[in-house]
Image (cartoon, rainbow, N blue to C red):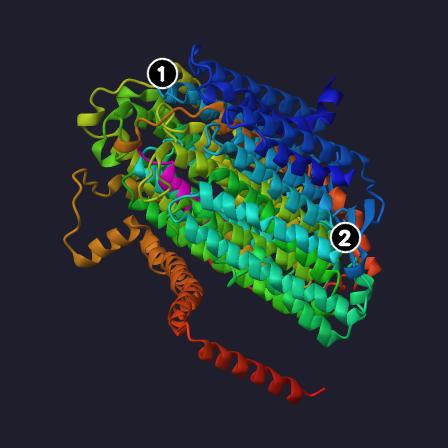
Amino acid sequence: MLSALIWLPLLGAIVISCFPSTVSSRTVRSVSLVLAIILLVWTIVLGSQFDLTATDMQFTELLPWLDTIGLNYSLGLDGLSLPLLFLNALLNVVAIAATDPEIPRSRFYYALIFVLNVGVVGAFLAQNLLLFFLFYEIEILPLYFLIAIWGGQKRGYAATKFLIYTAASGVVILAVFLGTVWFTGASSFAYDPGRSQLLPLGTQLLLLSGILLGFGIKTPFIPLHTWLPDAHVEASTPVSVLLAGVLLKLGTYGLLRFGLSMFLDAWAYLAPWLATWAAVGALYGACCAIAQQDMKKVVAYSSIAHMAFVLLATAATTRLSLIAAVAQMVSHGLISALLFLLVGVVYKKTGTRDVQVLRGLLNPERGLPLIGSLMILAAMASAGIPGMVGFIAEFMVFRSSFPIFPIQTLLCMVGTGLTAVYFLLMINRVFFGRLEDPFDKLPQVNWNDRIPALVLVAFILVLGLQPNWLVRWSESESGMLLTRMSMRTPPPVALTAKIEPARLLP
Amino acid sequence: MTQFLLQTIWLVPFYGVVGALVTIPWSAGMVRRTGPRPGAYINLFMTLLSFVHGSIGFIQVWGQPPQQLALEWLHAADLDIALTIEVSPISLGAMELVTCISLLAQIYALGYMEKDWSLARFFGLMGFFEGALAGIALSDSLFLSYGLLEMLTLSTYLLVGFWYAQPLVVTAARDAFLTKRVGDIILLMGLVALSSYGEGLNFSELADWADATPLVPWVAAVLGLSLIAGPTGKCAQFPLNLWLDEAMEGPNPAGILRNSVVVSAGAYVLIKLQPVFTLSPVSADALIVIGTVTAIGASLMAIAQIDIKRTLSHSTSAYLGLVFIAVGLGHVDIALLILFSHAIAKALLFMSAGGIIMTTSGQNITEMGGLWSRMPATATAFVVGSAGLIAVTPFGMFWTMHRWLDGSWTDSWWLLAVLAFANLLSAINLTRVFRLVFLGQPQAKTRRAPEVPWPMAIPMVTLSIVTLLAYTVPQGWQFWLSPTTPLMAQNSLFAQIAMPIELAAGLVGCVIGFSIELRRAWSRPAQISLRFLQDLLAYDFYIEKIYSVTVVAAVSGLSRLSDWVDRYIIDGAVNLVGLATIFSGQGLRYNVSGQFRFYVLTILLGVGLLLMVTVNLPS
């Protein structure tokens, strides 16, 4: 069952790249879209078969591969990976649907998208450290090409920066995996948190800091983040959607799966520092976002700020906070994907993303009224207005982290307040005001541009109004994660918990 | 049937939202053949429906004990969130007030917004607005109320930003959203803290919890303050008061709702939260201080304004300040009565102001005059609204003040002083505006001034009648909400002279308002001190300037600093490493001489170094 999710896109990539060059790019797009929808449906089928009460890996598959070096083809699915898997399948469809139908070198493009998909899905499913690493590395190459070939003006710089950063992250992670096997004396690379947890604290700290560095680059956390704004700015819209929506989640997924679960003592030891790191990241990302003039950069820095909430929740390590971390990942994936889609439409129609230049795009006759309205909605969702998925995810993050790290949580909440500041500044400049000369003859927005955005909006609203559908998957998983490790229960809330008066904003 | 309607009372807030959703084709401009009007009518019909449904429910529930309905909304680990509503005479009454004013304002908007091209969008937003307000009236859970308050923030943003092509509107909408958001975020902090401490987030549970739990004093104080912050933003209280004044750039029918029931929504939540404030004297004191500062400050600001909507909006802040004082003192019944009397009277005043604005196409009251004979219905509405608002004439606010000062409560002299002062200034201001607009010689803009059209006149007259009858509510109000039974110490000296003093203050205000010299030509006083005073009040005590040099400057400075750090230090370091690698590679390539002996030497040196390291390695 799970293998299909890996091999089907690979097969698709091969088939698509074997198309004769006479096939028009529209046909290739339709074929890819159908394949992506099949994958999405397959993921939904998996979800419907998923046993919510089970605490173990489900649908496990195990094939011996290179036994001598301890590499096995071992897959499994649990409540942590299922929501992310679904997010990936959905955003894959959205990204393909949002691709320009006349894109040059279309066969290579769609083949790369599917190879990327193989890497991501494989990484979410792998139950073997080395296998995870392989998939993690597979995903780098297609993304490099996607940025370097279909990117903007400085695409070479951005793509190389991305490649170097991510390759460095891969090297560090590989080193940690090797070290884990070395220190635990395991005979294979099978994912086995029970073993690594028994390591002495010093060793755990060493290995965990490698994990934090490696996945911290991927997520990214400051100061390891500078590849992200460049990559986003240069990447084309569908690639940005995938990058922000899915690929960043690999980082936080790795933290949960290979950091928290494997090195529990060290994690508990470092948790206060991690929470502080998250708070600094949230505020820093928000402050940087306020100063940006490029719409894509605003959204990119907002990604950095919002991914920090996942770190905060993971640092808190209660049952609720782990559910909240997964929920925040999904919520950020949907919302940032929507934001990038909309910015992409604005760029496509106006030819610029500069907030100093754009004005009055809400104009109903000659502007982009629907795109503008959706942008307001997306900004509100990102700012955590109730009724949308951003709010409940952030509320759970804050609610679960507050008893453990009150000050850091409050600082993160200030960061979420700043979200409204930068997005409102952007919307006010770009969409409000009078539509003036250079932009008063904008090309028509067709339904190809609108439908992917509307689909994401539907998900954001439905999951915001009915959050049970979002959190139920990880409920038993998070419980298992914690009981298996004889986790500390959330300590009885001290009534002397410190509350800091928040700063006033304009 | 009626029982069924009572059971489904929770549907009422959804009518407005459904209306807004159904009319999206018209508001988005997808249906062009019919024009935007059908969208407006559908929304109006939905509001009528919610009003009728609410009325039936209200009649049914009268005299019955409150009951709660809960919807299990979210369950995750140890977090259980239920959305609870309360069905009681008070909550349904509040909801009736909301739907009634919304209905009247929407009929009014049919006339006021007649020529606007996006009429349907306006009505859709009003439906959304009304839904959120009605929800707050019913809500019995802090979580739900918080969510709905945020909905209000959002819809205020959209309604103020309705005419988004105008530059002032753009900043007004942004400021309204951000100011309220500051309060909301702090409220969210309080909510998160309460939810981790408390048993549940229902108001009744919170009250029990507050009774039973001895909190560390400063924790209780900070918790209380954070809960106050949200309503402070919503009710436009100092220091988050400026948005309401700016929000007057939005369409007037939305202003009717905003100045009457929307600001009241924040205070309503405050009233519900009152038991939590008893935890700490600090939060109660903070309420009183905020309320007093706003009541006096905003009344003073109102006097110096020449924009008819802005002067009325400052007066809104002032009356809401009185509500804050009442909640701070624990006189929640009085707070509710002030909200009620103020909402109706202020809605009427805004309807009248809207008529004036539409006829004269201006908001500057110094350019008006002599409208009394030309617009009799509008003038009557203004007089009636003022009468309902000043505690001079025996209508709503008079009886409310009477109930407050007649010895039922232990009041102190400072309270009387504040009330008398606010009443005095309010009387001066309303008389001043009335003279400038309706009396005197007609000016250029008021010479051809027909009375407002029927769709505006009908709700205006209806609301005038309601205002005249509204005194029955404070008269007949039983103190249902107050935790302690009122004192009934009618014989004390205070009780005997308080109301006469309040009355005298209002009368003096009217006399002053009628006797001061009004300059229509805008001129500044020659005396430095007077000029300073006028500027100080007219520019809202320069609060905006203070903001821009403190908070705004801090945030923008910080963002520029972090951007600089990001660009030149963090990314600079990364690029430096990259450049260093490239240049060292470039430099090293000149070592490749092609001479065999050089390579052998390099290899020998390298291997030797490796050997040394290996040998000396501690094993």
Which secondary structure, mark 1? loop
- The residue marked by circle 1 belongs to what chain? B
The overriding secondary structure of the stretch rendered in magenta is: helix
Dividing the picture into quarters, in which one does residue B151 lie?
top right
In the rendered view, tell whether residue A493 sits above or below residue B456.
below
- Which of the labelled discs sits on residue A397, or is there none? none
In the rendered view, tell whether residue A119 sits above or below residue A503.
above
Label 1, on which residue? B453
Kind of residue at disc 2? Gln
Q: Quadrant of the C terminus of chain B?
A: bottom right
Dividing the picture into quarters, in which one does residue A212 lie?
bottom right
Q: Is disc 2 on the same chain as disc 1? A: no
Q: Give, as a single range, the part of the protein colored magenta.
A: A418-434
| Residue A140 locus on image (x, y percent) | 57, 50
| Residue A201 locus on image (x, y percent) | 74, 74
Out of A74 and A48, give the one closest to the viewer.
A74
- The residue at 42%/48% (across/down) is A155
Kind of residue at disc 1? Pro
Rounded to the nearest angstrom, the CA distance separating label 1 from label 2 is 74 Å
Q: Quadrant of the N terminus of chain B?
A: top right
Instruction: Please rate how many residues cluster around mark 1, counting C-alpha atoms within 10 Å: few if below 14, some from 14 to 19, many from 20.
Output: some
Out of A187 and A305, give the one closest to the viewer.
A187
Label 2, on which residue? A127
| Residue B235 locus on image (x, y percent) | 48, 45
- The residue at 25%/41% (across/down) is B515
Which secondary structure, mark 2? loop
- The residue marked by circle 2 belongs to what chain? A
